[in-house]
Amino acid sequence: IRTTDAATVDAVMASLAAYAAAGAGHRGEGESSGPVSPFSSKFIPPLSLVAYGRRLLKYCYCAPHGVLIGVVLLCRYCKATRHRLTPHTVHRLLLTSVVVALKTHFDVFYSNQYYAQVGGITTAEINRLEVALLDGLHFGATATLEELAAVTQRFSREAAR
């Protein structure tokens, strides 16, 4: 990755939102219409994923690559657990992935209470979601430069279509 800026994060968020919207109509056999994962929300959050990504950048006080590392972890979690992104899950999964990314890749990070407030959920919920994410990742929460570049290129290409 040559540069990572807020515009790159916007493009990745737009592509991720489109991917989640497409996944909403593809429930697996036997899946109910109710919550299907610990990341499910009863309602679709009113904030677009692009705006939510910007909010995380602004209030989590992280560099754009912090959010993109979160996307790497999000993708890895979905692959490992066969979790399908939907508009009901993508915001919580993104928030949790970014929190874990910040804790594992940066020297300074904030409390889960603060991150929960930024993300619009309770502290108990972010704690529970963090455990679920780490469990699904088998506690492998670091990302390589190659993974970061691949995910950024993939979603940026898709957003350009």
Image: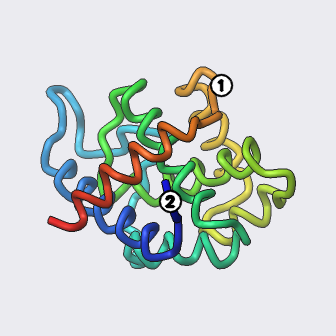
Residue 157: x and y in percent read: 25, 58
Q: Quadrant of the C terminus?
A: bottom left
Residue depicted at x 68% and y 61%: 122
Q: How many marks?
A: 2
User: Compared to 32, does 152 lie above or below?
Assistant: below
Residue depicted at x 60% and y 53%: 98
Q: In this rendering, does residue 43 appear at all?
A: no
Q: Earlier in the sequence, mark 2 or mark 1?
A: 2
Q: Residues within 10 Å of mark 1 (few under 14, many from 20)?
A: few
The residue nearer to you, when weighing 71 against 87, is 71
The residue nearer to you, when weighing 97 against 124, is 97
The residue nearer to you, when weighing 115 against 61, is 61
Residue 91 relative to residue 135: left or right: left
Q: Secondary structure at mark 2?
A: loop
Looking at the image, is mark 2 or mark 1 nearer the viewer? Answer: 2
In the drawing, what numbered circle is on residue 13?
A: none
Query: How far apart are labels 2 and 1 at the CA level?
Result: 29 Å
Residue 6: x and y in percent read: 51, 75
- Say what amino acid the circle numbered 2 marks: Arg
Residue 128 relative to residue 46: left or right: right
Query: Hey, which quadrant is residue 88 in on the image?
Result: bottom left
Residue 133 relative to residue 48: left or right: right
Residue 76: x and y in percent read: 45, 33
Residue depicted at x 56% and y 41%: 145
Q: Which residue is mark 1?
A: 139
In the drawing, what numbered circle is on residue 2?
A: 2
Q: Residues within 10 Å of mark 2 (few under 14, many from 20)?
A: few
Query: Hey, which quadrant is residue 63 in on the image?
Result: bottom right
Residue 127: x and y in percent read: 71, 45
Residue depicted at x 77% and y 56%: 112
- Say what amino acid the circle numbered 1 marks: Phe
User: Compared to 23, does 9 lie above or below?
Assistant: below
